[in-house]
Image: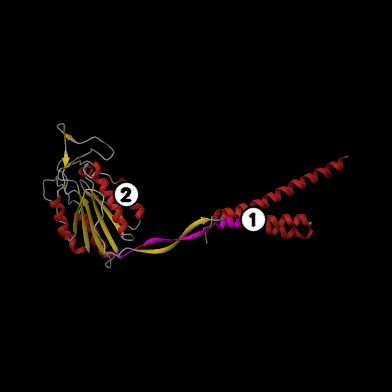
Amino acid sequence: MMVQPIWPVLAGALLLLGVTALWTWRRWPGQSRPARIAAGVRLLLTAAAVVIGLHPVGTVRVSVPRETTTDVVIVVDRTTSMGARDYADGRPRMTGAAADLTRLVEQVAGARVAVIVFDDDARLAVPFTTDATTLAGFWQTVGWRPSAKASGSDVAVAADLAEQLLRRAAEERPGHDRYLVYVGDGEQTAATPPTSFAPLRGLLAGALVLGYGTEAGGPMATSDDSDELIRVDGQVQLSRIDEPTLAALAEQTGGAYQHRTAPSDLPELVPSGSSATATAQVPGDEYYWIVAIAASGGLLYLLAASVAGMRAAREELSDATR
C-alpha cells in the first residue's frame, strides 16, 4: 500500500484534528459519559478525515520500458503521394505506415526516438523521447499534405537534418547505438536526383527502409481529410512506388529494405535483448472510501445524539414554562 496525499484535504483535516483534540482535552473533566462518547466519536471522525487526506491506495507491479542505450531517428514521407490508395484494401499508404511505426516503436521499447517529417522541406516533428504514448498519438495525426512547390518533392530532403540530429546524438551520448528508419514511397518528383544518405552510414548501427505503394499505382486524395482525388485535365493522377530509389537509400545507410503492401511482421531493427523492461509499482485500488463509509456510522451517531439532545432541551423548556 502507498499514500498519495491530497494536500488541501490533509492540511485541513490535520488542523481540524488538532483543534478538536485540544477542545476535547479542555472539556473532558466536566463532561458526562454520553458527552465523552460523543467527543471520542468526533476525534475518530477527524482522524478519519486525516486518513482520507492521505489517500491510501493499493499497489500493482507492472512491467515498464527501461531506457536503453539506443537512439532511433525515424524519417517519414508525408508528401501527397503517401495519400495514394494502394495499401491493403485500398487504404492510404500513410495508414499502413502509421500502423507499422506503432509496432516498430513497441519493438524498441525504452529507446529514445525522434521523428523527422518531410514534404516540401524537412523538420523535426518529435524530439528524442521515450514516451510511446506521445509517439502513438503522433502516428494517428501525421497525415500528408499537398506540395506547394511546382518543382516537385525530393525523397532525400531530410538527409541533412537527419545527419545533424544523429551527429548531435553521437556527441551527447557517444555510448548509444543509433538507428535510422525511413518510411516513404521513393517517388522523386523533383527535377534533380535525390541527395545521398551515405554520410549517415558511419553514424549508424543499423537502418531500415520501409517502402509503400505499388507498381500499378494508386489514386491520390487532395488531403488526408478529403475523398476528392487529384485530377489533371479531368484524369485521376496515380502515384507509383519507386523501389530502386528506396533500395539505393537502404544500401547507402547499410540497412535493409522491405516493401509494405499489407500488415505483416516487421524486420528486426534493434537486436533482440536491446529493449528492456523493469518492474515498477504503480497505484492500484483506492481504499479511502472504506474509511469514509466507516466514518458515516460515527456521523449518524452524532446526528442521533444531537436529535436526542434537542428533544431533551425542548422537554426541559416546556416543563419550565408550565
Question: Which image quadrant is residue 290 in?
Answer: bottom right
Between residues 287 and 125, which one lies in front from this camera angle? 287
Whole-Å distance between the Cαs marked 2 and 1?
48 Å
Nearer the observer, 179 or 14 = 179
For the residue labelled by badge 2, is the local secondary structure a helix, a strand or a loop? helix
Type of amino acid at the residue the image marks with label 1: Thr
Residue 128 visible in image: no
Q: Earlier in the sequence, mark 2 or mark 1?
A: 1
As drawn, the residue found furthest toward the right would be 322
Q: Position of residue 184 (x, y in %)?
A: 20, 49
Instruction: Estimate how packed mark 2 is, as few (under 14), some (14 to 19) or many (20 or more) residues with alpha carbons within 10 Å.
Output: some
**Residue bearing mark 2:** 138
Q: Amino acid at mark 2?
A: Phe
| Residue 79 placement (x, y as % from top left) | 21, 45
| Picture quarter with the C terminus | top right
Residue positioned 68% across, 49% down in the render: 300
CB under 8 Å between callouts 2 and 1?
no
Q: Taking 305 as reference, is 174 left or right? A: left
SS label for mark 1: helix
